[in-house]
Amino acid sequence: MKILLIGAAGTIGKAVAAELGQRHDIVAAGRKAGESVDIADIASVRAALARLGKLDAIVCAAGHVHFGPLAQMTPELYGIGLKDKLMGQVNLVLAGQEALADGGSFTLTSGVLTDDPIRAGSSASMVNGALEAFARAAAIELPRGLRINVISPTVLTESMAAYGAFFRGHKPVAASDVALAYAKSVEGAQTGQVFKVL
Amino acid sequence: MKILLIGAAGTIGKAVAAELGQRHDIVAAGRKAGESVDIADIASVRAALARLGKLDAIVCAAGHVHFGPLAQMTPELYGIGLKDKLMGQVNLVLAGQEALADGGSFTLTSGVLTDDPIRAGSSASMVNGALEAFARAAAIELPRGLRINVISPTVLTESMAAYGAFFRGHKPVAASDVALAYAKSVEGAQTGQVFKVL
């Protein structure tokens, strides 16, 4: 398969490339590395897809949200996550439908905070809940056997040095284990699912 | 209790007013009727709250999303629901925290499409999933015993003439039954919950 991987320079992205790259052609993309694309801008997504031609899968392990105490959040701060992690990934689906070959798949990324919130994480929870419900809905409308799933990882072992204080009591998972869920989505046949990696 | 009810002119709003109005003072609000407020504009929310003084509960049964086939959706069409039904209700929480008396509550409205999608409903699913996850997260950060819950009704009996074709096979519920869930949220003690009325 020819797989577009957005966020290829990130911790999850590198693990997904290592897992899926064993069997497939990975086109690495992101703001910082590989094929240049800003998912928050649907015109940038469309331009990248036009350059790349037909794809068998689009995987996104990118997306930014603002973390901050509820008492300090504003509509503008929620807007960061809505524009980037939420609509960025939705933009890939809107623009990517025509780029995918029959039976191709979208694999998006949410996270554990949908169901298991932490302090300062209300924007992440909001965006993750939105992505998971969107994917369940989009799955029943996608044409030509196209599929869509969401991977919901808990905090990564590799991220505990940076984020451990926010995730006390959460058992971290290795990025290589999270990458298996992306392989299940891309190489399996399920659709409309949220694969939790806890 | 003194309860601010946004969307008081709607089908759910009227039923909530009939239920809670038996025991409490209802301040009806909305774009069309009662106290004038546009929830999509946090300045409008702040102005209304400043006029009303201390409240014991804020209930929202308002919020618009665009329904349309996935293939015809655009970032702008998703933006309608994100700005109105999602951030409109979040604006009430952001601005309403200081207006609520100790132990006061927010009760927001999502809907069945979070988990049980229909064609043309991907924006509603997205927004509802976002609201439910936001409420779970906000619940653990609200101060002074403030609470927040979300009511998730399926299609209303009263709405079947207009929306029945979109909800084939869904068993409708009467708005008066949905109103009971709002009473459970306002008059009970739970927080961070999604009360489904199916």
Image (cartoon, coloured by chain):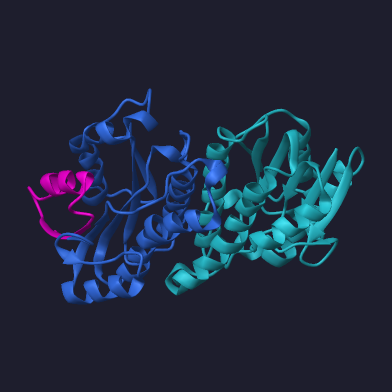
Chain colours: A blue, B cyan
The image quarter in which residue B86 lies: bottom right
Q: Quadrant of the C terminus of chain A?
A: top left
Rendered location of residue B63, percent (x, y): 66, 59
Q: Nearer the viewer, residue A20 or B61?
A: B61
Q: Is residue A2 visible?
A: no
Q: Residue at x 82, y 60 (%)?
A: B9
* B157 relative position to B153: left or right: right
- Position above or below: A24 against B162: above
Rendered location of residue A48, percent (x, y): 22, 72
Rendered location of residue B118, percent (x, y): 53, 58
* B52 relative position to A142: left or right: right
- Position above or below: B102 against A100: above
Q: Residue at x 43, y 44 (%)?
A: A67
- Position above or below: A119 against B41: above
The verdict on residue A16 being magenta is yes
Q: Quadrant of the N terminus of chain A?
A: bottom left
Q: Nearer the viewer, residue B138 or A195?
A: B138
Q: Residue at x 38, y 22 (%)?
A: A169
The verdict on residue A158 being magenta is no
**Residue at the right extreme, as displayed:** B22
Q: Which residues are magenta?
A: A1-28
